[in-house]
Image: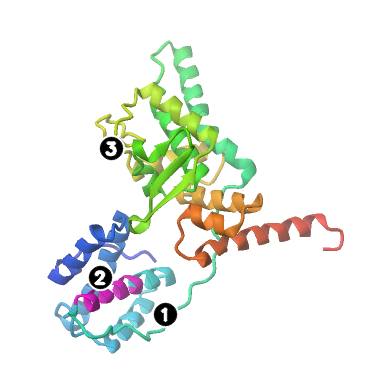
């Protein structure tokens, strides 16, 4: 059950305001992380007001308060993933309070949370990926043909070229949507075919870029007469005001191209990242290299993709072996 998100109240407390500011500035958290943490803190704030008719005193809350809160989330049928995310945000907040000596200990330590059911990441199969990557130009060709038949002005190609380059780059280098939207001209070395990526927590990494992605990018840049100056986004917003393309724009375009390619329109841009990792491992890449390219801090985060490849091998075995 999806919980409605009203105007946050929990983010108005001075300590919470400072914490969220530090997340954005010092730690370089993405807008998604800040939004999720704001919602998590607000969730506890609203629960405390419902139960006690008063806002929470963050410095005086005890372990029993959080145990009661956890049970309340369970009664509201909040998903296990949402509960885990809520308490992860609360733990991070109390680590901040500890660091700045607002509290002497964290009241969340020792609270057992419901375990997440292990779900394998969804991805686009390798044989279907080429259809998705070619969908923007296929769509452009169809629109141009319709315009010619109708004797009307054909659509401009720039948006289609940009969308093709965005999809190619996400899949080519395993990027998060925030990373592809935040890429700047100076981050890309065309000669070395390497992109410098600013990931979570402002951690930088370098990832290779495939030739098809570079060719697609060059075609887009030439069509829009991209300035290629320092600080300019690699992908410009449709308004051509030197602002980067937005994540929502990428998500909206992907839905259209998934439908054109005959794939599930519910797949997100992050599933292209899953596809990158799965296909790399399927074709012999070692786990450490994939971890480095994805920018995962821990190897166990990357290991989930080995389970995907193992499941696929089992399916192949069961279909092909006479005594499976």
Q: State the residue position of label 2.
A: 41
**Which of marks 3 and 1 precedes in the sequence?**
1
Please, what secondary structure does the residue beneath circle 3 have?
A: loop
Q: Position of residue 54 (x, y in %)?
A: 14, 79
Alpha carbon distance from label 2 to label 1: 17 Å
In the image, residue 46 above or below residue 237: below
Residue in the image at 55% along x and 55% along y:
289
Q: Disc 2 vs disc 1: Cβ atoms closer than 8 Å?
A: no
Q: Residue 79, which numbered label?
A: none
Quadrant where the image shows the C terminus: bottom right
Residue 88 falls in image quadrant: bottom left
Mark 1: give few (<14), some (14-19) or many (20+) Cα within 10 Å.
Answer: few
Q: State the residue position of label 1.
A: 113
Q: Residue 231, which numbered label?
A: 3
Alpha carbon distance from label 1 to label 3: 44 Å
Q: Which residues are magenta?
A: 87-100
Residue in the image at 86% along x and 63% along y:
323
Q: Is residue 268 magenta?
A: no
Q: Is residue 98 magenta?
A: yes
Q: In the drawing, does residue 101 fall left or right of residue 126?
A: left
In the image, residue 203 above or below residue 137: below
| Overall secondary structure of the magenta section | helix
């Amino acid at each position: 059950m999806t919980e409605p998100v009203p105007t946050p109240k929990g983010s108005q407390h001075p300590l919470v305001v400072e914490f969220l500011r530090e997340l954005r500035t010092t730690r370089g958290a993405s807008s998604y992380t800040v939004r999720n943490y704001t919602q998590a803190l607000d969730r506890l704030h609203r629960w405390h007001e419902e139960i006690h008719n008063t806002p929470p005193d963050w410095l005086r809350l005890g372990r029993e308060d959080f145990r009661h809160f956890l049970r309340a989330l369970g009664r509201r049928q909040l998903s296990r993933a949402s509960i885990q995310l809520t308490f992860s945000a609360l733990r991070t907040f109390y680590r901040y309070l500890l660091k700045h000596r607002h509290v002497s200990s964290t009241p969340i330590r020792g609270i057992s949370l419901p375990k997440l059911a292990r779900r394998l990441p969804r991805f686009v199969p390798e044989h279907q990926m080429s259809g998705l990557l070619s969908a923007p130009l296929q769509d452009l060709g169809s629109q141009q043909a319709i315009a010619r038949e109708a004797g009307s002005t054909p659509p401009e190609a720039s948006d289609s070229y940009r969308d093709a380059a965005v999809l190619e780059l996400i899949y080519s280098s395993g990027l998060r949507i925030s990373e592809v939207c935040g890429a700047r001209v100076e981050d890309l070395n065309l000669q070395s075919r390497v992109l410098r990526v600013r990931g979570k927590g402002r951690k930088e990494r370098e990832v290779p870029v495939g030739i098809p992605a570079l060719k697609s990018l060059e075609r887009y840049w030439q069509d829009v007469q991209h300035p290629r100056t320092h600080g300019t986004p690699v992908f410009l917003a449709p308004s051509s005001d030197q602002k980067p393309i937005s994540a929502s724009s990428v998500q909206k375009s992907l839905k259209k191209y998934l439908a054109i390619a005959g794939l599930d329109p519910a797949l997100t841009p992050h599933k292209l990242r899953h596809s990158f990792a799965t296909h790399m491992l399927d074709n012999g890449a070692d786990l450490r290299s994939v971890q480095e390219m994805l920018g995962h801090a821990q190897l166990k985060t990357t290991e989930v993709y080995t389970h995907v490849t193992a499941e696929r091998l089992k399916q192949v075995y069961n279909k092909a072996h006479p005594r499976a």
